[in-house]
Amino acid sequence: MTDDTLEELVKEISRYEAIISEWDETYRGVVVGLKRAIEALHKEALTRLIKTVKQESMPALRNAVKDEVVYGVLLYHELVKPPIPPLTQRIQQALDEVRPGLKSHNGDVELVDIKPPDTVEVKLIGACSNCPTSTVTLSQGIEQAIKSYCPEIVNVLAVR
């Protein structure tokens, strides 16, 4: 057994994909078909293995999934869920998504507070703080972005 990292294994696959990408379309199609068949076989085998291991020892399964290669392959086959980033990080991603539009009008937004379980307070700054359309910016821009990244958030409030 080798101790290759996930990164090394993915680089190896990418190297072969680069070679194949230069082949004639007919040959590439054969390779892609073979790849899909092998992946389907592996996914079915992994699904059955997980079912068996779950029945015998959940701690062993949890331990195995901690390995980056095991986790990466199971994630690729959609047999485990990707980790959900922390709420603060997802809110910041949402705010980063709307920032360019706000900055184009000399404004910005900052996260003030998260009030569990479902409320976020933000502060409009710069030109956005006293703009007549700030309520529209809040509801149709900032609030929508936050709710798309954080469906658990129900209320987005602007504070001064």
Image (cartoon, helix red, strand yellow):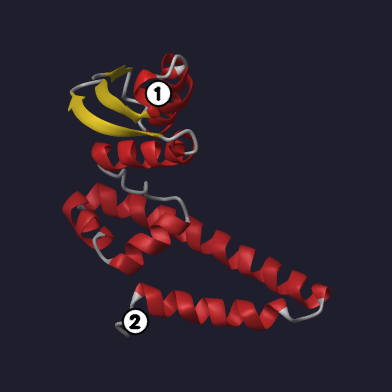
Q: Residue at x 28, y 26 (%)?
A: 123
Residue placed most toward the observer, 62 or 109: 109
Q: Secondary structure at mark 2?
A: loop
Q: Is residue 72 above or below residue 150?
A: below
Q: Nearer the viewer, mark 2 or mark 1?
A: 1
Please state the horizontal and vertical placement of residue 42, each as a whole percent of the image: 49, 63
Residue identifier under label 2: 4
Number of dots carrying numbers: 2
Q: Look at label 1 and name its amino acid.
A: Glu
Toward which corner of the image does residue 146 lie, by quadrant?
A: top left
Say above or below: 106 vs 130: below
Secondary-structure class at tag 1: helix
- The structure residue drawn at horizontal position 38% and vertical position 62%, both measured from the top left corner, is 72
Q: Nearer the viewer, residue 144 or 127?
A: 127
| Residue in the image at 40% along x and 80% along y | 8
Residue located 27% across and 49% down the image: 54
Q: Position of residue 5 (x, y in %)?
A: 33, 77
Q: Residues within 10 Å of mark 1 (few under 14, many from 20)?
A: many
Q: Quadrant of residue 16?
A: bottom right
Say the numbered circle drawn on residue 111. none
**What x and y, as percent, mark residue 92?**
32, 40
Residue 115 as seen in the image, left or right of residue 27:
left
Name the foreground residue: 135 vs 46. 135
Residue type of the residue flagged with mark 2? Asp
Picture layout, residue 105 above or below residue 100: above
Q: Position of residue 63 (x, y in %)?
A: 20, 59
Callout 2: few (<14), some (14-19), or many (20+) C-alpha neighbours within 10 Å? few
- Tell me: 27 left or right of 105: right
Q: Quadrant of the C terminus?
A: top left
**Disc sitting over residue 143 in the figure:** 1
Q: CA distance from mark 2 to mark 1?
A: 44 Å
Side of 152 where 143 appears, left or right: right
